Image (tube, rainbow, N blue to C red):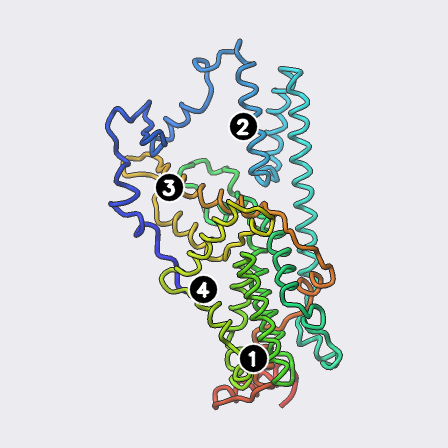
Amino acid sequence: MPQTPPFSAMFDSSGYNRNLYQSAEDSCGGLYYHDNNLLSGSLEALIQHLVPNVDYYPDNQIRKIAPKILQLLTEWTETFPYDFRDERMMRNLKDLAHRIASGEETYRKNVQQMIQCLIRKLATLSQYEEVLAKISSTSTDRLTLLKTKPQSIQRDIITVCSDPYTLAQQLTHIELERLNYIGPEEFVQAFVQKDPLDNDKSCYSERKKTRNLEAYVEWFNRLSYLVATEICMPVKKKHRARMIEYFIDVARECFNIGNFNSLMAIISGMNMSPVSRLKKTWAKVKTAKFDVLEHQMDPSSNFYNYRTALRGAAQRSLTAHSSREKIVIPFFSLLIKDIYFLNEGCANRLPNGHVNFEKFWELAKQVSEFMTWKQVECPFERDRKILQYLLTVPVFSEDALYLASYESEGPENHIEKDRWKSLRSSLLGRV
């Protein structure tokens, strides 16, 4: 897949950096502003601006400080709850909260509510991760199942859910649930190896925790392999063709819903080599609708068509009159790449040593937009049977997919023939 162009190329001397050096009238205590937006400044100036001291808040004005600190802690725990999975962070939070509560009785209730809400969120997160681990531990390769259970009595996706529109809705359930558990901290943790702005080696970010983000990427891969498995598994050509047309309809409905991640996973699965080589099967498929979908997700021109469709879905979400119209599920791998190249392509510090706040504003803008999308509640009715199948049914490995493909439509050349023999020997124990 083509990589997104580095943001350093997009924001050159004519873009991001042209207004970074302002006249003295735009500076205040070592911090530089443009149109009332903070552009840059030294880390020392920022600390001096933000951290209370004797000059800012004398001891006899502690009552003025407490509500501001409590508001900050409340917003922090609500927006970035995963930060407090670190025992040291939780310990410091409770210590500071205790000081606020003991200083003024009226704050005690608010402090208790904040801590209890945070603990509930972290407990829910732990339960979700336990479920993910259980699903992962019970998954087996589809080929193992085929060896022990006759293929004629195995289920496929169409026997579980004959309506492609219903399947698209259930996929949207999974997408929104998994998105909801990704914390904004995980985007930072995904790219930060060592914070160049922080020389403290005991920085809390040393414990890299991106498990929910990684689990979501794994879900995309699983869905792609599930689609390929369902297509390659049927023995009869007409059944394979029917399965392809079924997934085309599922993908089309995903596009209509605004579920671009499932859409791209389905297209990726249908474009995998073991599927695309089934020429006799594809000859029986009406591919016009699939061609339209591929055009929408075409990676050329930095995914221009997809980005246009995403902006349309985002605009629809802003003016939505129903929960369904609010759904925006981006192609997640591309979102990650965009954030990665923005992070890598723009320096954290400017040549004069100031912190490049404009870069961080842009990062915050992208993550904030994602945070808005992930909080949408799925309006469709849950079907446990379909969800269970999508999440737990065994899928073929890449080798097993090739073997199933060769078994369905024989090898076309010597290279494929040699690989087929090798796979039959290694996977089936046959010569």
> Which residue type does callout 1 highlight?
Tyr
The residue most toward the front is: 321
Residue 44: horizontal and vertical position, in percent? 37, 27
Q: Which residue is mark 2?
A: 72
Q: Which residue is mark 4?
A: 296
Q: Which residue is mark 3?
A: 359
Residue 103: horizontal and vertical position, in percent? 62, 15
Contact between marks 4 and 3 (CB within 8 A): the answer is no
x 69%, y 42%: residue:
123
SS assignment at label 3? helix
Q: Which residue is mark 1?
A: 402
x 28%, y 41%: residue:
17
Q: CA distance from mark 2 to mark 1?
A: 55 Å
Quarter of the view holding residue 158: bottom right
Of the 4 image quadrants, the one containing the C terminus is bottom right
First along the sequence among labels 4 and 3:
4
Q: CA distance from mark 1 to mark 3?
A: 45 Å
